[in-house]
Image (tube, rainbow, N blue to C red):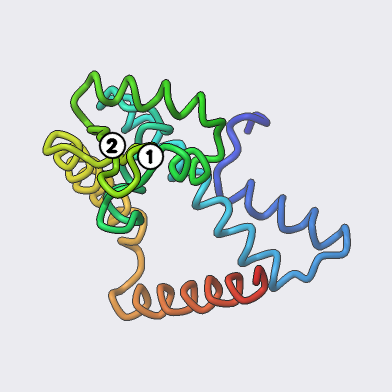
Amino acid sequence: MSRTAKSERSRYEAEVAAYVEAGGDEQVQRVITAVHGLARRLSQWYTQNLSDLDLTAGEWAVIRHLAAEADDHISTPSQLAETAAVAPSSMTHRLDRMAERGLIEREPDQDNRTRILVHLTRDGWEMFRQVVRHSDMVESDVLSHLPAGQRDKLAHLLELAIAGLDDALK
């Protein structure tokens, strides 16, 4: 097998072995490396899927934030830039492209006329739904080897890990 043709499983095993050899706890490294490998492979698939929909990962980050994370599905360009970890000027250009495509609208905040509010349009919401429905099929395939009870247990354990991460970052 060539170096570039490693399976995800063999890559995982090699990474865990290297981290353990360097002094990492095997149990911790198995979990973290598995989560990272799964995220990496899903990210590759998402990038391709978004490209097929003529959407960049940065545009998806805006759509996802507005649909799922922003208060009342409204945000400011500054908040979006911070969430996406990009410069405000980069976010302005991204929002310009998205507005031209009819995915978002910007309007002055009625309570603070110096501030601009961003929200999804009907087309933006439809794009969100389309990406979610399409990605749900792949995500379901990834988990198809796990019975429903094990999926619930895995979700619960990962939720506990996320809560621990939130506590550690406070």
Q: Residue at x 28, y 36 (%)?
A: 108
136 vs 7: above or below:
below
In the image, taking residue 109 as reference, residue 40 lies left or right, namely right
> Picture coordinates of residue 89 (x, y %)?
51, 24
Within-10-Å neighbours for mark 1: few <14, some 14–19, many 20+: few
Is residue 71 or residue 138 the one in the foreground? 71
Q: CA distance from mark 1 to mark 2?
A: 6 Å
- Which residue has dot 1 on it? 115
The residue to which callout 2 is attached is: 108
Q: Quadrant of residue 124?
A: top left
Q: Please identify the quadrant where the C terminus is shown.
A: bottom right
Instruction: Name the amino acid type tagged 1.
Output: Arg
88 over 23 or under it: above or below: above
Q: Are marks 1 and 2 in contact (CB under 8 Å)?
A: yes
Residue positioned 58% across, 53% down in the render: 36
Identify the residue at horizontal 53%, vertical 71% (top origin): 162
Task: Determine crowd level at label 2: few under 14, some 14-19, many 20+ residues with C-alpha closer than 10 A.
Answer: few
Residue at x 61% of width, y 70% of height: 165
Q: Position of residue 74 (x, y in %)?
A: 29, 49
